[in-house]
Amino acid sequence: MDYITELVAGEKAAGVKYVKADEPYFAGHFPGEPVMPGVLIVEALAQVGAVALLSMAENRDKLALFRGIDKLRFRGIVRPGDTLNLEINLTAMKGVVGRAVARAHVESKVVATGELIFALADRDNK
């Protein structure tokens, strides 16, 4: 993710990733037909979600960890030169575990949707 475009602490966040042709993963994914790996789209969404969660005053010294992914579907291809828009809406929090609805799109084309599950952890400040 390159930057955050919207933030409501503890509720939602949006961000942008500029997909550049010189990113190293394009060399092998796929030669002659570069496609951004789905796992990196999910990671970009998770980074936006972490911003929404960790921007809350009570979470500022915590770590946001991936706990799971539900109902995630890839609905389009992301290619070099695309601007990937990332949206997260936090939907539930029970103790240290929470859930968010995630959506990624290029222009008006949705390329990924699903739910991300996360957990908060204390930092080990040794």
Image: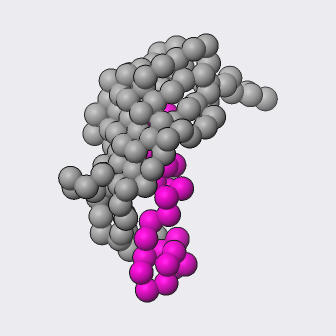
Is residue 75 shown above or below 45?
below
Q: Main secondary structure of the magenta part?
A: helix
* Number of numbered callouts drawn: 0
> Where residue 34 appears, x then y in whole percent?
43, 76
**Left or right: where does residue 43 sit relative to residue 119?**
left
Report the quarter where the C terminus lies: top right
Camera-nearest residue between 63 and 79 = 79
| Residue at figure coordinates x 41%, y 39% from the top left | 102
**Residue ID at (49%, 78%):** 30
- Residue 17 visible to an observer of this rendering: no
Residue 41 visible in the shown view: yes
Residue ID at (36%, 69%): 79
Q: Picture quarter containing residue 111?
A: bottom left
Question: Which residue does the image show at 49% across and 41% down from the upper left?
Answer: 71
**In magenta stretch: residue 120:** no
Residue 33 included in the magenta stretch of the image:
yes
Residue 29 against residue 51 in the figure, above or below: below
Which region of the structure is painted magenta? 24-50
Instruction: In the rendered view, tell whether residue 41 sits above or below residue 77.
Output: above
Q: Is residue 15 left or right of residue 73?
A: left
Between 11 and 20, the one lying in front of the other is 11
